[in-house]
Image (cartoon, helix red, strand yellow):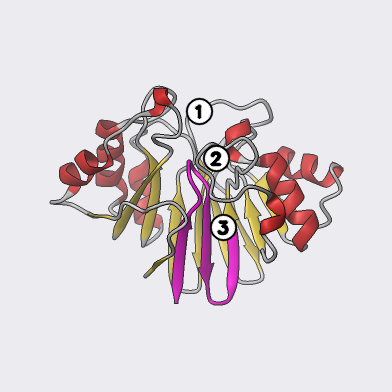
Amino acid sequence: MNKITWLGHAAFKVESNGLVAYIDPWIKGNPVSPLKNYKEIVKADLVLVTHDHEDHGFIDAIRICRRTGATFVGVFELANKARRRLVRKTVGGNIGGEIDINGTKIYFTPAWHSSKIAAPCGFIIKIGDFTIYHTGDTGFYSDMEYLGKLYNIDVMMLPICSNYMMGIREAFWAVEKVNPKMVIPMHYNTFPNLRADALAFKEMLKAISLVKILEINIEFEL
């Protein structure tokens, strides 16, 4: 059984084959987070952070890893920073590389964005026969097509807010290139300057992909 829970903004909980992973777990300061404190998370195996902007949960990720013993995953420099913050288990990678953590494969994808430390990234995560692609914060780039050829993507999570990254139109192009089985929009309606119409996005994509608009903190089973 595969389960995905949207925790608001770009944060997700993914459960598959007994593994529990959190991606960009921004809790403190997140106005739409259903969690009020990182201590509400009692089990995690992996915590992945796409980049070091505050709204992607690097500080919360450190706290979650310390509390649960989870492995922190991020680009090499960010993983090293987590280790200096006393996270016991860290695995760093970089764009275009794939790592294997106890059978879970994680491929680091490009993300056209900014960050203070190293480069931002996205993650393609393969747990057994279930593969998800969390794009991170990124603008559209045509080489996304090759990610779809390299991996058979079951679920793609991507931003639709525009302003700092791709909007609905560019997200449509990204889905065309990657050709996932299902799409979950994210990173929208957290703040007034990140407004987007997820229903309009779903309507645009109805001929090429299934769009699932998740409600925050409602578990979705695939």
Which numbered marker is on residue 1? none
Q: Position of residue 155 (x, y in %)?
A: 37, 58
Would you name the residue on which mark 2 appears? 121
Q: What element carries label 3?
A: strand
Q: How crowded is mark 3: few (under 14 residues within 10 Å), some or many (20 or more)?
A: many
Circle number at residue 106: 3
* In the displayed structure image, the side of residue 186 where residue 24 appears, left or right: right
Picture layout, residue 30 above or below residue 11: above
What residue is drawn where x is 34% and y is 55%? 149
Decide if residue 17 is in sight here.
Answer: yes
Q: Which residue is drawn at 74% across and 45% down?
A: 79
Residue type at the position of mark 2: Cys
Q: Is the magenta stretch mostly helix, strand or loop?
A: strand
User: What is the spatial separation of the Cα atoms under label 1 and label 2, in whole angstroms?
Assistant: 8 Å
Q: Disc 3 residue type?
A: Ile
Q: Name the residue under label 1.
A: 113
Contact between labelled residues 2 and 1, with CB atoms less than 8 Å apart? no
Q: Nearer the viewer, residue 116 or 40?
A: 40
Cα–Cα gap, marks 3 and 2: 12 Å
Magenta residues, start to end = 1-21
Disc 1: CA contacts within 10 A as few (<14), some (14-19) or many (>=20)? some
Q: Earlier in the sequence, mark 3 or mark 1?
A: 3
